[in-house]
Every structure is written in structure tokens, then in C-alpha cells.
Image: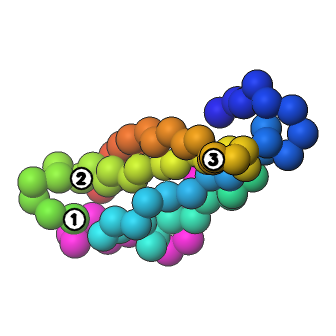
Amino acid sequence: AGDRDLGENSDIIYSINTSNLSSHFDINDSTGQISIKSSIDYENLTESSNGTITLWVVACDKGTPALSSTAQLSIQVKV
């Protein structure tokens, strides 16, 4: 994500909205890089998900008022 503001207002903070599997992932709040912090058991994914985990990633600037945008990230878990 990018922000055209100057100074601290242009800083972006990334986060993952809480969901049933978001606890398995970590996000670097400065870069937005997502990593796995605990193993995911394919057997525990719901049948309706077809092995797909959906995370909602939020990018928020430090402006006043703060502006944010949310993106859907789909992760396919293979056996």
C-alpha cells in the first residue's frame, strides 16, 4: 500500500482482522509481510472452504482522521 501524505501521516500500519484461523498467521505491521506462526491441519478446515483460508488484511495510515482500506486474501491449503 502507499500513501501520498508526507511525514508520519504517510506511514502505513498493517493488521489482520480476527477470524477463526487468523491466529495461525502473523503480519509485519510495517511491511505487511504475512507469515505462518503455527501449523494448519488440513483436516480441521471446514468442508465448505475447500481448503481455502480467507484473511482480511487492513492497511491504515497515521493521518487524522486515519484512513484505511481492507483487502481479502485467499490462501489455498494443499495436502
**Contact between labelled residues 1 and 2, with CB atoms less than 8 Å apart:** yes
Which numbered marker is on residue 10?
none
Write the residue at 34% across / 65% down.
19
Q: Is residue 46 above or below residue 64?
A: below
The residue labelled by disc 2 is 51
* Quadrant of residue 35 within the rendered picture: bottom right
Quadrant housing the N terminus:
top right
Pinpoint residue 55: horizontal percent, then vertical percent: 39, 52
Q: Is residue 10 above or below residue 16?
A: above
Q: Residues within 10 Å of mark 3 (few under 14, many from 20)?
A: few
Write the residue at 70% across / 30% down.
2
Quadrant housing the C terminus:
bottom left
Query: Magenta stretch?
Result: 34-44
Pinpoint residue 42: horizontal percent, then vertical percent: 27, 64
Label 2 element class: loop
The residue labelled by disc 3 is 66
Which numbered marker is on residue 45?
1
Q: How is the image coloured?
A: rainbow
* Farthest residue, direction right: 7
Please say whether residue 78 is visible from this viewpoint.
no
Q: CA distance from mark 2 to mark 1?
A: 6 Å
Q: Is residue 50 magenta?
A: no
Left or right of residue 55, residue 60 in this image: right
Q: Nearer the viewer, mark 2 or mark 3?
A: 3
Label 1 element class: loop
